[in-house]
Image: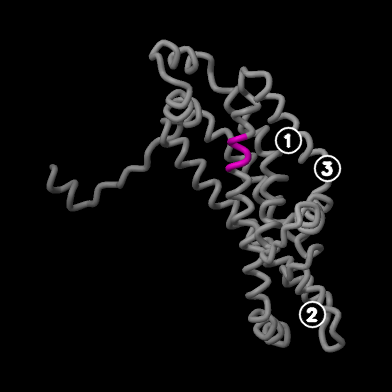
């Protein structure tokens, strides 16, 4: 009962830091998806300059530390450009989105390149424009293959969001450390609390992505569409 009471007393104080973690993860993932598709399509371009720009950005953000990127986005760049950012969370989201978007760009590029040759040839035969080809044929075919690795990256982004505490944001990890260091609190209890919270959030992300994957596969006929089983009275009426 003491444990349950401790959880009941501690949970309300975690709501605000939980909102910081969820916001950094959710909006960071949305921005990362935009970056991933932009850089992924550019990296697969036949134009050398476009492909070179994409590869430079991808390799830069994949090859440097996320911690260093956070400090550059939040501390260094505002000083260099003499711009003051009051919303540190927004800048941290941009840094998370660029970092994980660079990784996801390779997923997008690889999945698109993996679409069967016949699909590309069919687009040429139909005289589709580049955007018609991508929107109507190629991306719908590649999207189900992208979702599993993107799901893994989204979970990694959730765990990576704990680094925003290094630039002054009070997320779950930061809050647990502050509370755990108080004389009347136990660090082990609060570390256990955030362990469970991170697990629940990761599970929700994985479940949501599995739902998207099943839906995407049904959309292109790779999985059967669920049909409603006829009720007994309907069967009698038909008979």
- Magenta segment boundaries in residue numbering: 34-38
- Pointer 3 or 1: first along the chain: 1
**On the rendered image, what quadrant is the C terminus found in?**
top left
Name which residue lies at 53% across and 30% down.
Answer: 142
Q: Quadrant of residue 173?
A: bottom right
Asked whether 162 falls inside the magenta stretch, the response is no
User: Which dot, 2 or 3, sits closer to the camera?
Assistant: 3
Compared with 93, 173 (above or below) is below
Residue at 69 percent of width and 57 percent of height: 91
Looking at the rendered structure, the secondary structure element under dot 3 is loop
Name the spot of residue 190 as percent of width and height, x first.
Answer: 77, 75
Residue at which label 1 appears: 57
Residue 36 shown in magenta: yes
**Can you identify the residue that label 2 sits on?**
179
Tell me the SS state at disc 2.
helix
Q: CA distance from mark 1 to mark 2?
A: 39 Å
Return the disc, 1 or 2, that comes first in the chain's sequence. 1
């Amino acid at each position: 009962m003491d444990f349950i009471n401790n959880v009941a007393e501690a949970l309300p104080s975690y709501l605000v830091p939980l909102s910081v973690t969820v916001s950094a993860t959710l909006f960071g993932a949305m921005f990362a998806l935009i970056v991933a598709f932009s850089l992924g399509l550019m990296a697969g371009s036949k134009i050398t300059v476009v492909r070179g720009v994409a590869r430079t950005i991808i390799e830069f953000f994949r090859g440097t530390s996320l911690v260093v990127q956070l400090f550059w986005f939040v501390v260094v760049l505002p000083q260099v450009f003499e711009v003051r950012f009051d919303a540190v969370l927004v800048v941290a989201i941009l840094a998370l989105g660029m970092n994980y978007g660079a990784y996801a760009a390779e997923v997008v590029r690889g999945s698109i390149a993996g679409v069967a040759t016949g699909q590309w040839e069919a687009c040429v035969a139909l005289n589709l424009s580049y955007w018609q080809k991508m929107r109507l044929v190629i991306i719908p075919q590649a999207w189900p293959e992208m979702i599993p690795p993107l799901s893994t990256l989204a979970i990694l982004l959730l765990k990576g969001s704990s680094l925003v505490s290094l630039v002054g944001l009070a997320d779950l990890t930061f809050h647990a450390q502050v509370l755990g260091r108080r004389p009347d609190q136990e660090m082990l209890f609060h570390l256990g609390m955030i362990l469970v919270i991170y697990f629940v959030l990761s599970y929700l992300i994985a479940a949501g992505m599995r739902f998207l994957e099943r839906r995407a596969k049904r959309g292109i006929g790779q999985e059967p569409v669920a049909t409603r089983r006829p009720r007994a009275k309907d069967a009698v009426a038909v008979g």
